[in-house]
Image: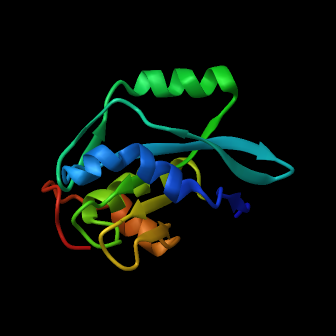
Amino acid sequence: LRVLNIPLDIQARFLALARFNTKNNVETCGILSGKLKDNQLFVTSLIIPNQMGTSDTCTTKDEEAIFEFQDKRGLITLGWIHTHPSQTCFLSSVDLHTQCSYQLMLPEAVAIVCSPNHTPDFGIFRITTPNGLKVIANCKIKEPFHPH
């Protein structure tokens, strides 16, 4: 895998943008975008797309606009970031399935969870390969929240 460089201030920047939703117990999500340089990946942009959130879900809207934004700037998707306003810092089954999609497109892709009301309050996650990724990719359970 290539090295993925993430800005040290990504948590603070994202939580500042998510402050209103977090105070109202609503998840916020963002896209980590960047570039490949000298065989290393660099997160250079944090995109906050149109979205709908609840206390334990966040769904992006108008994904075409995200791709257009990235395409015009020569950016690639390197992962995603989201808050857990009332939950601990972990990947839920919904998060695991979301991360699976990102990781199938780019093996280095990460999921960042910001859980400002718990300790630890920040985590960077990937699904283990090959076994973990296979389990999630082959999951047939339809209910959004289920054990893994």
Q: Nearer the viewer, residue 78 or 143?
A: 78
Q: Quadrant of residue 97?
A: bottom left
Whether 39 is drawn above or below 135: the answer is above
Residue 48 seen in render: yes
* Residue at the right extreme, as displayed: 38
Q: Residue at x 36, y 47 (%)?
A: 18
Q: How many marks?
A: 0
Q: Quadrant of the N terminus?
A: bottom right
Q: Quadrant of the C terminus?
A: bottom left
Q: Residue at x 22, y 58 (%)?
A: 140
* Residue at the left extreme, as displayed: 143
Q: Nearer the viewer, residue 101 or 45?
A: 45
Rendered location of residue 125, percent (x, y): 48, 68
Q: Nearer the viewer, residue 148 or 77?
A: 77
* Residue at the bottom extreme, as displayed: 119
Q: Residue at x 34, y 49 (%)?
A: 19
Q: Residue at x 64, y 61 (%)?
A: 8
Rendered location of residue 50, percent (x, y): 34, 29
Using residue 30 as the reference point, say whether residue 26 is left or right of it: left
Using residue 63 as the reference point, say whether residue 105 is left or right of it: right
Q: Nearer the viewer, residue 107 or 64?
A: 64
Whether 96 is drawn above or below 23: the answer is below
Rendered location of residue 72, percent (x, y): 64, 20
Residue 80 seen in render: no
Using residue 53 as the reference point, say whether residue 124 is left or right of it: right
Whether 64 is drawn above or below 22: the answer is above
Rendered location of residue 24, percent (x, y): 19, 49
Using residue 115 as the reference point, say whether residue 141 is left or right of it: left
